[in-house]
Amino acid sequence: MNSLLRLLPLLPLAILSVSAQNATTPESQRILQHVQYLASPELAGRAPGTEGNDKAAAWLKERFVELGLRPGAGSDYLQKFPMTMGLKLGASNSVVFSTIVEKPGIPLEKTTPTKFGWKLGVDYQPYGWTESATVSGPVVFVGYGLSTKGYDDYAGVDVKGAVVIVIKGLPKWAESNPSLKAAAALRTKATTARDKGAVAVCFVNEEGDSSDVLTRFGMDRLGRNSGIVAVQVRRTPCARIFPPKETQLFVAEKKIASTKKPQSFALKNTSVSITTSVEAVEGTTNNVLAILPGTDPSLSNEFIVVGAHFDHLGMGDENSLHAKAENVVHPGADDNASGTAGVLEVARRLVANPPKRSVLFMAFSGEEKGLVGSKFWTNTPTVPLDRVVAMINMDMIGRMKDNKLNVQATGTSTSWKDVLERAQKDLGLKISTTADGFGPSDHSSFTAKNIPTLFFFTGLHSDYHRPTDTYEKLDYDAMLLVLTMVERVVQDVAGNSARPDFTAQHSQSSTQGSSSSAGFKVTFGVIPDYSDDPQGLRITGVKPGSPAESAGLKADDVITAFGGTTIKNIYDLTAAMSSKNPGDVVNVTVLRDGKSVTMKATLTGR
């Protein structure tokens, strides 16, 4: 399950308790063995570009061959594709301060500045989304870096060409203020600093037990191109740059807390030069594809896709929720060895009872890095895209509780209601549904191509994206219920001469292109493409009836400006939307076929 989940919430989901291993039949034992191998230390978390991921792909190919399935990528089962595997720090990263200490009777211009620096990895760390550049300027403390109606940390200070110091988070009194809460995200604060004219932003933790902790360096798949130099700094070295006999960091923070008013100021006689260098680590990985030919000559040239991603977080990347910083295997048993094993088991059943339409089984890589593998396939399909009648996705299907199963994307076809009612008959499942065809898993890539999709999911749990997501915690007997339902859906769709229609009627709870952050009052309705685009935010489509559709935006537009905000990524868009109200009319500029086009959008309430 991709970490877009943090920005794009699903239905309210209860955290599941740990369930004991349950595999009482030969079939469930076989699924257990599949998950046990995929989640084994030998595969080391199956991160794309690693030996463990390559081993998993080769193993999946072997299973498809054993089942007698045909290659799904031309003459091979492996579809190789390039992707950014991660980030690394370049050779040039430095932070050097220059400060002048006033001496009685000596003019400032004749006083030799004192220079000192922060040590990389000890005092500070660049963010993966920093602009790689060298900048310099005066240093300005801007409190929590908020700028909203009623509270503005930038009021009364000039930050053009400056490096700003920003405290992470919010003061306690502001946590109940919707507009301040909406503006508190780290990337939103960076966008605000950039739009105010700052050349760099240094984020420091609030006073507390974790004030000297640096967060894990890594890639942000929702947009690396922030357009501003950005670093994080430990509290102790940051506090030392505040000149003696002037207001100190601790004092300013406490005063904001007590007065509920900004306490921003320039650090007297202090400037800094910051160089950041972050480089992408490129590599290749593979989707694993196999075909079961259909039995009906008139329907076998059409395909139903049954898919799941097999990659995970390896030794723990930037998406790990592990509390400790050390590298440790993240097995990814439920996420998503469970769905991968499900694809193999559904394939085994369908081989024994071949459907009328052909079935294309897909094991995707790169999902955890932003649905990269499924996007690659839908952009470079190995069968004609117009012959794909439906896509069934399984992601995290191993931790069912109380027979509750969530089926998403039901709004992508008017056929799904009846199909699901027939498929769940006599299974005793408690089905919850959501209509939205977009979400944090691979079905989204197919929805964006106007293909009807369904997404089967048994819910989140406390082991999600942690080293504790291990094979013995899955309920393999319960997985059989999910797989039976998936098998029935495939057979139902395959046996119907009429293809499922595609509908763009997604649920209003969808946050694609609006925002999931608390306090947002408006929706815009674009469907972002989260691959990094240096020109701006590329979109894969717009929601029906949305302000974006009414304004004239369409798939493959690259948004470059929204109102007065330059847009480089989804964070810039949400930052620009945070201060808007229903009824506001904004100019939206996009690149379309290489030309800049400006449209007016009237925003609506969420």
Image (tube, helix red, strand yellow):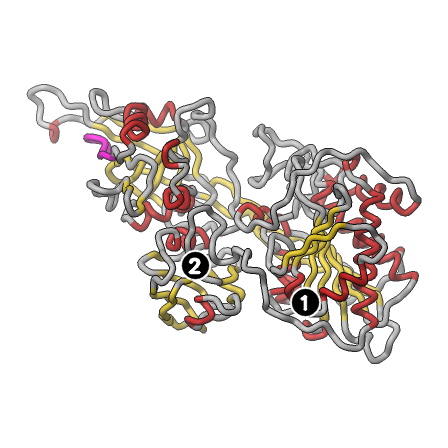
Magenta span: 264-271
- Residue 469: % across, % down: 70, 36
| Residue highlighted by disc 2 | 605
- Residue 412: % across, % down: 64, 66
| Residue highlighted by disc 1 | 452
Q: Is residue 441 above or below residue 101?
A: below
Q: CA distance from mark 2 to mark 1?
A: 28 Å
Q: Is residue 11 left or right of residue 401?
A: left
| Amino acid type at image mark 1 | Pro
Of residue 36 and residue 414, the one placed in the foreground of this image is 414
| Amino acid type at image mark 2 | Gly
Of residue 298 and residue 219, the one placed in the foreground of this image is 298
Q: Residues within 10 Å of mark 2 (few under 14, many from 20)?
A: few
- N-terminal label among 2 and 1: 1
The secondary structure type at the circle numbered 2 is: strand
Of residue 172 and residue 290, the one placed in the foreground of this image is 172
Q: Main secondary structure of the magenta part?
A: strand
State whether residue 361 appears in this view. yes
